[in-house]
Image (cartoon, rainbow, N blue to C red):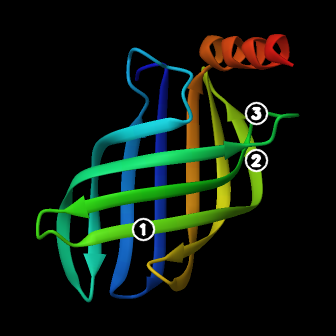
Amino acid sequence: MGDRIGYAVGTTGPWDAFLVFTAPSPEDPLSDTGHLTGGWLLRDGALRRLDAAERHDVRDPRTGFITGLGIEGIDSDGRRLTARGTTLSRFALETGSLCVNTFVEWDVDGRAGHGEDQDVWSIGRFAERRRAERAAG
């Protein structure tokens, strides 16, 4: 695993769901923008790979944990995905890395849904980010 990955999954029903894996660009590993490393879109029962997606995180300045996120993507059939998530609850696991697992209420293309997010960091990279945030005020 690299220094950081994002994993988001959401569903609005039995035939509509998405799964998106992202990572920030190597030039800006502390960025709140991640780019697709893999994923798919299930829409009306048709499952397709995502060709592109971008993730944008909103963080609590006190903890560094995600309070909201947005995902924009497009699949191999040209279908667009727009998902906006609001975090409802979370817990953190430290097992050699830091995984902040969050239950998310999603708006997926105007439909209400639910799912989860995993914000996974190397311990050192998360500490680096928190130090940079404190230094910036």
Amino acid of disc 2: Phe
Quadrant location, the N terminus: top left
Q: Secondary structure at mark 3?
A: loop
58 vs 49, nearest the viewer: 58
Please tell me which residue is depicted at 68% across the width and 18% down the height of the picture.
129
- How far apart marks 2 and 1 lie (CA) works out to 26 Å
Labelled disc at residue 82: 1
Kindly indicate whether the residue at mark 3 contacts the one at mark 1 (C-beta within 8 angstroms). no
55 vs 115, nearest the viewer: 55
* Screen quadrant of the C terminus: top right
Q: Position of residue 36 (x, y in %)?
A: 32, 43
Is 3 situated above or below 11?
above
Kind of residue sitting beneath label 3: Gly
- Which residue carries the number 3 mark? 64
- x then y, percent, for residue 12: 48, 83
Q: Earlier in the sequence, mark 2 or mark 1?
A: 1
Sequence-first tag of 3 and 2: 3
Residue 29: image location, x then y, percent: 49, 19
Q: Residue at x 68, y 11 (%)?
A: 128
Left or right: where 30 falls relative to 40: right
| Quadrant in the rendering for residue 15 | bottom left
Residues at circles 3 and 2 in contact by the CB criterion of under 8 Å: no
Q: Nearer the viewer, mark 3 or mark 2?
A: 3
Residue at left 73%, top 13%?
132
Q: Earlier in the sequence, mark 1 or mark 3?
A: 3
- Please say if the residues under marks 2 and 1 sit with CB atoms less than 8 Å apart: no
Kind of residue sitting beneath label 1? Thr
Q: Is residue 84 above or below residue 112?
A: above
Q: Which residue is mark 2?
A: 91
